[in-house]
Image (tube, grey):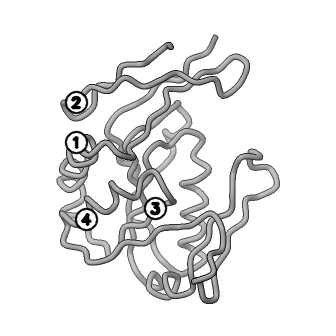
Amino acid sequence: MDEYTLEICGLTRKLPLTFVSKNTRLASFNLLGDVELVDRLADVLYEKLKDVEFDFLVGPEVKVVPLIHGVALRLGHKRFVVCRKSVKPYMLSPVILRPLAHFPKHVRQLVLGGRDAALLSGKKVVIMDDVVSTGVTIRMMEKLMEKVGATVVKTVCVLRQGEQFDKMENLIFLAELPVFKI
């Protein structure tokens, strides 16, 4: 198996390379279950966010949730919000943002329960994801925050993959992942 060696925040991880198209491979990054990495990243992101004025951390399900929890805990936040990819039975008056027609087929809708939407209304938020590759999820989270009346003050990701983000304002990232063209 081909691997990419990622050096991040003093830790080393071997990431498997996977094909995403006939001529393109990406290093597969997954935080789930890696307690040491999540704790180290949460410490570093706490330092980057401790002086930023905001009310809630918001992120998509599911891989980044342990990191959001760790950062929220370090910041003393008692709550964070997760954008789901489908409507759940417990959601009252869900707010749904569907992908635009020109988005890639793999992009799914984002959903907030009505209570979370009301909680975020009028608040300042930091949106967080594990990897920003196409930028579609981040843009959709920004649109969903706008839809519910929240203001995004920062965007945070662990890894930035690709070069299409030079114009993305307020993006904090800890390392870059290359795109492997064959």
Q: Please, what is the three-letter code of the amino acid marked with disc 1?
A: Glu
In three-dimensional space, the C-alpha distance between marks 4 and 2, rounded to whole angstroms, equals: 26 Å
Q: Type of residue at label 3?
A: Gly
Residue identified by numbered label 3: 59
Up/down of 81 relative to 148, above or below? above
Instruction: Give the Cα distance between marks 2 and 1.
Output: 9 Å
- Amino acid carrying label 2: it is Leu
Q: Are marks 2 and 1 in contact (CB under 8 Å)?
A: yes
Q: Is residue 118 above or below residue 140?
A: below
The secondary structure type at the circle numbered 2 is strand
Q: Quadrant of residue 128?
A: bottom left
In the figure, is residue 89 to the left or right of 7? right
Nearer to the camera, 158 or 173: 158
Q: Which residue is mark 2?
A: 11
First-in-chain label (1 vs 4)? 1
Q: Position of residue 85 (x, y in %)?
A: 62, 63
| Residue located beneath label 4 in the image | 52
Q: Residue 178's x, y, as percent? A: 48, 23
| 4 vs 2, front mark | 2
Helix, strand or loop at mark 4: loop
| Vertical arrangement, residue 181 with respect to residue 88, above or below | above
Q: Which mark is residue 36?
A: 1
Q: Which callout, 1 or 3, points at the residue further toward the start of the chain?
A: 1
Q: Nearer the viewer, residue 90 or 53?
A: 90
Give me the C-alpha separation between circle 1 and circle 4.
25 Å
Q: Residues within 10 Å of mark 3 (few under 14, many from 20)?
A: many
Left or right of 69 in this view: 104: right
Q: CA distance from mark 1 to mark 3?
A: 21 Å
Q: Are marks 3 and 4 in contact (CB under 8 Å)?
A: no
**1 or 4: mark nearer the eye:** 1
Mark 2 or 1, closer to the camera: 1
